[in-house]
Amino acid sequence: MTERSLKGVKRLVGKLEYRQQRGANLVKTNNKSNPVTDGEVPTQIKNPELVRERRRHIIDSTVTLFIQHGYHKTTTRMIAKAANFSIGSLYEYVSSKEDLLYLVCKAIHEEVQDAVEDALSNSAREKEQLAEVIRQYFYVCDKMADHILMMYQVTQFLPQKWKEQVLVNELNITDIFIKTLGQLSGKNNFPKLDGKILNLVGHNISVLGQMWAFRRWHLKKELTIDEYISIQTDFILGLIL
Protein backbone atom coordinates (compact mmCIF):
# COMPACT_ATOMS: atom_id res chain seq x y z
CA MET A 1 0.00 0.00 0.00
CA THR A 2 1.40 3.42 -0.96
CA GLU A 3 1.78 6.24 1.55
CA ARG A 4 -1.00 8.13 -0.22
CA SER A 5 -3.35 5.16 0.03
CA LEU A 6 -2.47 4.70 3.70
CA LYS A 7 -3.37 8.34 4.43
CA GLY A 8 -6.68 7.85 2.65
CA VAL A 9 -7.50 4.81 4.77
CA LYS A 10 -6.66 6.72 7.96
CA ARG A 11 -8.94 9.59 6.92
CA LEU A 12 -11.76 7.13 6.22
CA VAL A 13 -11.29 5.38 9.57
CA GLY A 14 -11.26 8.75 11.29
CA LYS A 15 -14.56 9.73 9.66
CA LEU A 16 -16.16 6.42 10.62
CA GLU A 17 -15.03 6.76 14.24
CA TYR A 18 -16.39 10.30 14.35
CA ARG A 19 -19.76 9.20 12.98
CA GLN A 20 -19.96 6.30 15.45
CA GLN A 21 -19.18 8.58 18.38
CA ARG A 22 -21.66 11.19 17.16
CA GLY A 23 -24.32 8.52 16.79
CA ALA A 24 -23.63 7.22 20.28
CA ASN A 25 -23.93 10.73 21.71
CA LEU A 26 -27.23 11.23 19.93
CA VAL A 27 -28.56 7.97 21.35
CA LYS A 28 -27.54 9.01 24.85
CA THR A 29 -29.17 12.39 24.39
CA ASN A 30 -32.39 10.87 23.08
CA ASN A 31 -32.49 8.28 25.87
CA LYS A 32 -32.21 11.00 28.49
CA SER A 33 -34.87 13.19 26.95
CA ASN A 34 -38.09 11.79 28.41
CA PRO A 35 -37.48 8.95 30.85
CA VAL A 36 -40.56 7.51 32.49
CA THR A 37 -40.19 7.40 36.27
CA ASP A 38 -41.75 5.26 38.97
CA GLY A 39 -40.96 7.14 42.17
CA GLU A 40 -37.18 7.40 41.93
CA VAL A 41 -36.71 4.51 39.49
CA PRO A 42 -36.40 5.69 35.87
CA THR A 43 -37.09 3.67 32.74
CA GLN A 44 -36.83 4.42 29.02
CA ILE A 45 -40.07 2.52 28.26
CA LYS A 46 -42.73 5.08 27.38
CA ASN A 47 -45.84 2.96 28.16
CA PRO A 48 -46.64 3.31 31.92
CA GLU A 49 -49.02 0.34 31.95
CA LEU A 50 -46.42 -1.90 30.33
CA VAL A 51 -43.81 -0.71 32.83
CA ARG A 52 -46.13 -1.47 35.74
CA GLU A 53 -46.99 -4.92 34.42
CA ARG A 54 -43.42 -5.93 33.56
CA ARG A 55 -41.98 -4.56 36.80
CA ARG A 56 -44.53 -6.47 38.86
CA HIS A 57 -43.50 -9.67 37.09
CA ILE A 58 -39.82 -8.90 37.74
CA ILE A 59 -40.57 -8.08 41.40
CA ASP A 60 -42.37 -11.37 42.01
CA SER A 61 -39.50 -13.32 40.45
CA THR A 62 -36.94 -11.38 42.47
CA VAL A 63 -38.68 -11.97 45.80
CA THR A 64 -38.57 -15.73 45.25
CA LEU A 65 -34.86 -15.63 44.40
CA PHE A 66 -33.93 -13.40 47.35
CA ILE A 67 -35.69 -15.76 49.74
CA GLN A 68 -34.13 -18.88 48.19
CA HIS A 69 -30.58 -17.62 47.66
CA GLY A 70 -30.22 -14.47 49.73
CA TYR A 71 -29.77 -10.89 48.57
CA HIS A 72 -26.01 -10.98 47.92
CA LYS A 73 -25.96 -14.32 46.12
CA THR A 74 -28.81 -13.37 43.78
CA THR A 75 -27.42 -11.87 40.58
CA THR A 76 -29.14 -9.76 37.95
CA ARG A 77 -28.55 -12.60 35.50
CA MET A 78 -30.50 -14.95 37.78
CA ILE A 79 -33.30 -12.37 38.05
CA ALA A 80 -33.46 -11.94 34.27
CA LYS A 81 -33.62 -15.69 33.72
CA ALA A 82 -36.35 -16.21 36.35
CA ALA A 83 -38.43 -13.40 34.83
CA ASN A 84 -37.83 -14.63 31.24
CA PHE A 85 -36.01 -11.43 30.28
CA SER A 86 -32.70 -10.91 28.58
CA ILE A 87 -30.18 -8.90 30.59
CA GLY A 88 -30.63 -5.99 28.20
CA SER A 89 -34.41 -6.06 28.52
CA LEU A 90 -34.20 -6.24 32.31
CA TYR A 91 -32.11 -3.07 32.43
CA GLU A 92 -34.82 -1.26 30.48
CA TYR A 93 -37.03 -1.53 33.57
CA VAL A 94 -34.59 -1.49 36.50
CA SER A 95 -30.92 -0.66 36.83
CA SER A 96 -30.02 -2.47 40.07
CA LYS A 97 -31.16 -4.80 42.83
CA GLU A 98 -31.64 -1.70 45.00
CA ASP A 99 -34.26 -0.48 42.50
CA LEU A 100 -36.12 -3.73 42.96
CA LEU A 101 -36.17 -3.45 46.75
CA TYR A 102 -37.72 -0.01 46.51
CA LEU A 103 -40.29 -1.29 44.00
CA VAL A 104 -41.22 -4.19 46.31
CA CYS A 105 -42.03 -1.71 49.06
CA LYS A 106 -43.98 0.46 46.65
CA ALA A 107 -45.97 -2.52 45.37
CA ILE A 108 -47.02 -3.44 48.93
CA HIS A 109 -48.18 0.12 49.58
CA GLU A 110 -50.20 0.22 46.37
CA GLU A 111 -51.88 -3.12 47.15
CA VAL A 112 -52.87 -1.88 50.62
CA GLN A 113 -54.12 1.44 49.26
CA ASP A 114 -56.34 -0.26 46.69
CA ALA A 115 -57.67 -2.79 49.21
CA VAL A 116 -58.58 -0.08 51.74
CA GLU A 117 -60.30 2.09 49.14
CA ASP A 118 -62.37 -0.88 47.98
CA ALA A 119 -63.30 -1.74 51.58
CA LEU A 120 -64.45 1.80 52.34
CA SER A 121 -66.57 1.98 49.21
CA ASN A 122 -68.33 -1.36 49.79
CA SER A 123 -69.30 -1.10 53.46
CA ALA A 124 -72.07 1.05 54.92
CA ARG A 125 -71.71 1.34 58.71
CA GLU A 126 -68.59 2.55 60.52
CA LYS A 127 -67.84 -0.60 62.51
CA GLU A 128 -68.32 -2.79 59.43
CA GLN A 129 -66.14 -0.43 57.39
CA LEU A 130 -63.25 -0.72 59.82
CA ALA A 131 -63.65 -4.50 60.05
CA GLU A 132 -63.58 -4.73 56.25
CA VAL A 133 -60.50 -2.50 56.04
CA ILE A 134 -58.70 -4.79 58.50
CA ARG A 135 -59.85 -7.90 56.61
CA GLN A 136 -58.67 -6.66 53.22
CA TYR A 137 -55.34 -5.46 54.61
CA PHE A 138 -54.68 -8.82 56.26
CA TYR A 139 -55.52 -10.55 52.99
CA VAL A 140 -52.87 -8.40 51.29
CA CYS A 141 -50.37 -9.39 53.99
CA ASP A 142 -51.20 -13.05 53.34
CA LYS A 143 -50.96 -12.64 49.57
CA MET A 144 -47.69 -10.68 49.76
CA ALA A 145 -46.20 -12.40 52.80
CA ASP A 146 -42.95 -13.24 51.00
CA HIS A 147 -42.64 -9.66 49.75
CA ILE A 148 -43.10 -8.25 53.28
CA LEU A 149 -40.65 -10.71 54.82
CA MET A 150 -38.03 -10.02 52.17
CA MET A 151 -38.43 -6.25 52.51
CA TYR A 152 -37.52 -6.40 56.20
CA GLN A 153 -34.70 -8.89 55.67
CA VAL A 154 -32.77 -6.95 53.04
CA THR A 155 -33.57 -3.27 53.63
CA GLN A 156 -30.38 -3.06 55.69
CA PHE A 157 -28.36 -3.49 52.49
CA LEU A 158 -29.84 -0.41 50.82
CA PRO A 159 -28.07 2.95 50.52
CA GLN A 160 -29.18 5.45 53.17
CA LYS A 161 -31.51 7.44 50.89
CA TRP A 162 -33.31 4.24 49.88
CA LYS A 163 -33.63 3.13 53.51
CA GLU A 164 -35.28 6.44 54.27
CA GLN A 165 -37.65 6.01 51.33
CA VAL A 166 -38.63 2.51 52.48
CA LEU A 167 -39.37 3.86 55.98
CA VAL A 168 -41.47 6.64 54.46
CA ASN A 169 -43.48 4.10 52.47
CA GLU A 170 -43.86 1.93 55.58
CA LEU A 171 -45.26 4.89 57.51
CA ASN A 172 -47.50 5.72 54.55
CA ILE A 173 -49.13 2.29 54.93
CA THR A 174 -49.80 2.96 58.63
CA ASP A 175 -51.05 6.43 57.75
CA ILE A 176 -53.77 4.82 55.58
CA PHE A 177 -55.26 3.27 58.73
CA ILE A 178 -54.83 6.40 60.81
CA LYS A 179 -56.68 8.46 58.20
CA THR A 180 -59.39 5.81 57.89
CA LEU A 181 -59.93 5.85 61.66
CA GLY A 182 -59.98 9.65 61.57
CA GLN A 183 -62.73 9.61 58.93
CA LEU A 184 -64.83 7.23 61.04
CA SER A 185 -64.13 8.93 64.38
CA GLY A 186 -67.25 10.46 65.93
CA LYS A 187 -69.60 9.38 63.14
CA ASN A 188 -72.94 7.96 64.30
CA ASN A 189 -72.19 5.34 66.98
CA PHE A 190 -68.45 5.22 66.34
CA PRO A 191 -66.52 6.72 69.30
CA LYS A 192 -64.57 9.95 69.04
CA LEU A 193 -60.86 9.12 69.06
CA ASP A 194 -58.08 11.53 69.99
CA GLY A 195 -54.81 11.78 68.09
CA LYS A 196 -52.86 9.41 70.35
CA ILE A 197 -55.47 6.66 70.06
CA LEU A 198 -55.72 7.12 66.28
CA ASN A 199 -51.96 6.80 65.95
CA LEU A 200 -51.65 3.79 68.28
CA VAL A 201 -54.53 1.82 66.75
CA GLY A 202 -53.27 2.61 63.24
CA HIS A 203 -49.87 1.14 64.11
CA ASN A 204 -51.53 -1.85 65.77
CA ILE A 205 -53.42 -2.69 62.58
CA SER A 206 -50.27 -2.33 60.50
CA VAL A 207 -48.12 -4.52 62.77
CA LEU A 208 -50.75 -7.21 63.38
CA GLY A 209 -51.18 -7.67 59.64
CA GLN A 210 -47.44 -8.01 59.15
CA MET A 211 -47.25 -10.44 62.07
CA TRP A 212 -49.07 -12.98 59.89
CA ALA A 213 -46.29 -12.64 57.31
CA PHE A 214 -43.52 -13.00 59.91
CA ARG A 215 -45.05 -15.83 61.99
CA ARG A 216 -47.20 -17.69 59.47
CA TRP A 217 -44.80 -20.64 59.66
CA HIS A 218 -46.20 -21.20 63.17
CA LEU A 219 -49.63 -19.54 63.10
CA LYS A 220 -50.79 -21.65 60.15
CA LYS A 221 -50.48 -24.74 62.34
CA GLU A 222 -53.33 -23.45 64.50
CA LEU A 223 -55.25 -20.90 62.45
CA THR A 224 -56.48 -20.20 58.95
CA ILE A 225 -56.06 -16.66 57.68
CA ASP A 226 -59.80 -16.06 58.17
CA GLU A 227 -59.66 -17.25 61.79
CA TYR A 228 -56.65 -15.03 62.39
CA ILE A 229 -58.49 -12.06 60.88
CA SER A 230 -61.58 -12.68 63.02
CA ILE A 231 -59.61 -12.87 66.30
CA GLN A 232 -57.44 -9.85 65.55
CA THR A 233 -60.39 -7.79 64.35
CA ASP A 234 -62.22 -8.43 67.63
CA PHE A 235 -59.05 -7.46 69.48
CA ILE A 236 -58.63 -4.18 67.55
CA LEU A 237 -62.30 -3.22 67.82
CA GLY A 238 -62.15 -4.00 71.53
CA LEU A 239 -59.49 -1.31 71.93
CA ILE A 240 -61.80 1.46 70.73
CA LEU A 241 -65.46 0.35 70.99
Image: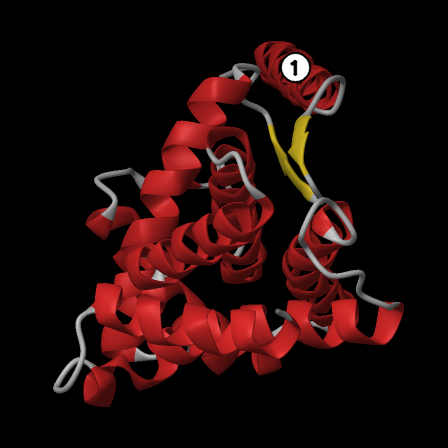
Residue 77 rendering spot, x and y as whole percentages: 31, 55
State the image coordinates of residue 79 (x, y, percent, origin top left).
Answer: 31, 55
Return the residue nearer the eye: 133 or 92.
133
Q: Residue at x 44, y 49 (%)?
A: 132
Viewer-closest of 199 and 4:
199
Estimate how packed mark 1 is, as few (under 14), some (14 to 19) or many (20 or more) residues with alpha carbons within 10 Å.
few
On the picture, is 218 further left or further right than 203?
A: left
* The C terminus: image quadrant: bottom right
Residue 91 drawn at (x, y percent): 47, 40
Residue 181's x, y, as percent?
70, 55
Up the image or down, 8 lies above or below 84; here it is above
Residue 121 to residue 144: above or below: above
Quarter assignment of residue 145:
bottom left
Q: Residue furthest bottom?
A: 218
Of residues 204 and 239, the one nearer the viewer is: 239
Q: Nearer the viewer, residue 7 or 135?
A: 135
Residue at the spot of label 1: 23
Q: How many marks?
A: 1
The image's colouring method is secondary structure
Residue extending farthest right: 195
Tell me where residue 87 sits by quadrant. Answer: top left
**Residue displayed at 77% across by 53% down:** 182
When the figure is inspected, residue 70 is found, relative to residue 128, above or below; the finding is below
Label 1 element class: helix
Q: Residue at x 54, y 69 (%)?
A: 237
From the viewer's perspective, tell me whether residue 165 is left or right of residue 210: right
| Residue 129 visible from this viewpoint | yes
* Residue at the front extreme of this rendering: 189
Q: In percent of the image, x 71 and y 45: which residue is there? A: 188
